[in-house]
């Protein structure tokens, strides 16, 4: 963990290094992913069989080995402990309500020249949803991907999830039942995304692929964009906490570690105007690391990528620093977070006040937890129903409307050196 102070003459150089640091895996996966995708495209199911055995130790031998049935998902749901089932249902209801409010409206109007204009929103036909199953299994990710797709009106939702050595997580299956997922295939990694994009004898292709994954999954999405739509190319998790000295240091330490425990390449940053408070948070981090079941991973992340930034004026300095970081998650743990919210332009999701830990947003708040990382919040947004929809514009002219605007179209077509364009207009003006 490193500490930076804005009053230090070297602050700008050191902070720029933090902003520009790349935390992705240190090996080049692009070539490996390209080879895997080519193999899936050319060999289909045979390639999936090979890669599932190699990467997950799982044999796709019989037909039953390939999929998880809706009946199995219902069984997993029915046998859940009551508190877990209630928690998943609460999360699903809140996610559904939030995303229903995102549904766009069609437009259909006639302007002052008599031209009818508008747009119709329609869902894609099929969506592929990646659910991790390696370092950890996340039923929350399934809900965050499947429910917006269903709200958008997608008819066919297809989950791919690795089942190492044949083991599947019952919470993930229960979440699939709650969300109404249509298909679940027991494959993961880059080869699973290749199957979704290209299709195989068993797996029909989809139109959009969403969901988080490791470096291989992220690279596969990057390479497949254009064959299918994607939500984003996501990197390691990150959290930025803006906190004054009035906070409980134990709370802030836990918030910072909530992202550090994801992966050794995750990043946790604290901006505060109280150096003594920062020292207390550091002590609390050390104590909590020794008690966490995920402490080994969290410590690797914290030691390599954790940062404390000490400023003189929190409200004046923190928003500008936050904008440069453009973090996935930004917590604002102060009495009045509203000025910070209005001043910060680049963030995946913002958590307001001392009683809003990022972890609540990961599960039950409602907004999507699939968010841009690696400073991509400067130009992209979190997953929404719009990722599963597309807009078709339309226009219609009668003779009077055509006479008003058609000649200008012909003039511009001639100016661009496109006489056929011009002629298609001019023939109608005679």
Image: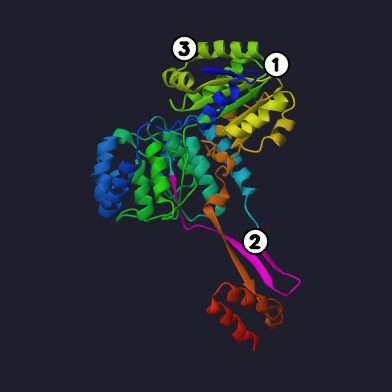
Could you tell me residue 231's position as x and y percent?
50, 47
Sequence order check, earlier mark of 1 and 2: 2
**Dot 2 corresponds to which residue?**
106
> Which quadrant, please, contains the C terminus?
bottom right
- Disc 1 or disc 2, which is closer to the eye? 1
10 Å neighbourhood of mark 3: few (<14), some, or many (≥20)?
few
Could you tell me residue 218's position as x and y percent?
42, 41
Q: Is residue 221 visible?
A: yes
Main SS, magenta region, reads strand
Q: Does the stretch in magenta take in 112?
A: yes
**Dot 3 corresponds to which residue?**
290
**Dot 1 corresponds to which residue?**
246
Q: Does the stretch in magenta take in 259?
A: no
Start-end of magenta stretch: 107-129
Label total for image:
3
The answer to whether residue 203 is above or below residue 25 is below
Quadrant of res 281? top right
Quadrant of res 243? top right
Residue at 65% of width from left, 48% of height from top? 101
Could you tell me residue 354's position as x and y percent?
67, 23
Q: Nearer the viewer, residue 148 or 378?
A: 378
Q: Nearer the viewer, residue 356 or 346?
A: 346
Q: Is residue 186 visible?
A: no
Sequence order check, earlier mark of 3 and 2: 2
The secondary structure type at the circle numbered 2 is loop
The secondary structure type at the circle numbered 3 is helix
- Disc 3 or disc 1, which is closer to the eye? 1
């Amino acid at each position: 963990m490193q500490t930076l102070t804005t009053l230090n003459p070297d602050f700008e150089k050191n902070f720029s290094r933090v902003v520009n640091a790349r935390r992705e895996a240190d090996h080049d996966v692009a070539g490996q992913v390209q080879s895997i995708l080519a193999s899936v495209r050319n060999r289909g199911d045979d390639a999936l069989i090979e890669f599932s055995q190699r990467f997950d130790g799982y044999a796709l031998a019989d037909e039953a080995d390939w999929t998880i049935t809706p009946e199995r998902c219902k069984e997993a749901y029915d046998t859940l402990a009551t508190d877990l089932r209630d928690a998943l249902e609460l999360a699903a209801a809140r996610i559904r309500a939030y995303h229903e409010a995102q549904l766009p409206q069609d437009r259909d109007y006639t302007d002052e020249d008599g031209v009818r204009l508008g747009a119709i929103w329609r869902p894609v036909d099929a969506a592929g949803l990646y659910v991790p199953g390696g370092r950890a299994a996340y039923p929350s990710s399934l809900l965050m991907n499947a429910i917006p797709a269903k709200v958008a009106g997608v008819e066919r939702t297809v989950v791919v999830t690795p089942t190492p050595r044949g083991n599947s997580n019952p919470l993930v299956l229960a979440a699939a039942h709650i969300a109404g997922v249509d298909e679940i295939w027991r494959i993961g990694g880059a080869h699973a995304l290749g199957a979704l994009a290209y299709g195989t004898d068993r797996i029909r292709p989809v139109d959009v692929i969403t969901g988080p994954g490791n470096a291989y999954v992220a690279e596969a999405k990057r390479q497949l964009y254009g064959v299918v739509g994607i939500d984003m190319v996501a990197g390691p998790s990150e959290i930025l906490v803006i906190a004054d000295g009035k906070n409980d240091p134990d709370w802030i330490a836990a918030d910072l570690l909530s992202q550090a425990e994801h992966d050794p390449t995750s990043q946790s940053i604290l901006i505060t105007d109280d150096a003594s408070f920062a020292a207390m948070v550091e002590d609390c981090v050390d104590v909590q690391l020794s008690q966490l079941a995920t402490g080994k991973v969290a410590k690797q992340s914290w030691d390599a990528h954790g940062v404390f930034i000490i400023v003189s004026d929190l409200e004046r300095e923190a928003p500008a620093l936050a904008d440069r970081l453009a973090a996935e998650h930004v917590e604002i743990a102060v009495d009045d977070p509203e000025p910070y919210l209005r001043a910060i332009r680049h963030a995946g999701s913002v958590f307001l006040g001392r009683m809003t830990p990022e972890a609540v947003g990961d599960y039950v708040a409602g907004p999507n937890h699939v968010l841009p990382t690696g400073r991509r919040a400067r130009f992209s947004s979190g997953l929404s129903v719009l990722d599963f929809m597309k807009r078709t514009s339309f226009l219609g002219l009668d003779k009077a409307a055509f006479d008003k605007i058609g000649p200008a179209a012909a003039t511009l077509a001639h100016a661009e050196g496109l006489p056929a364009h011009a002629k298609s207009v001019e023939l109608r003006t005679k």
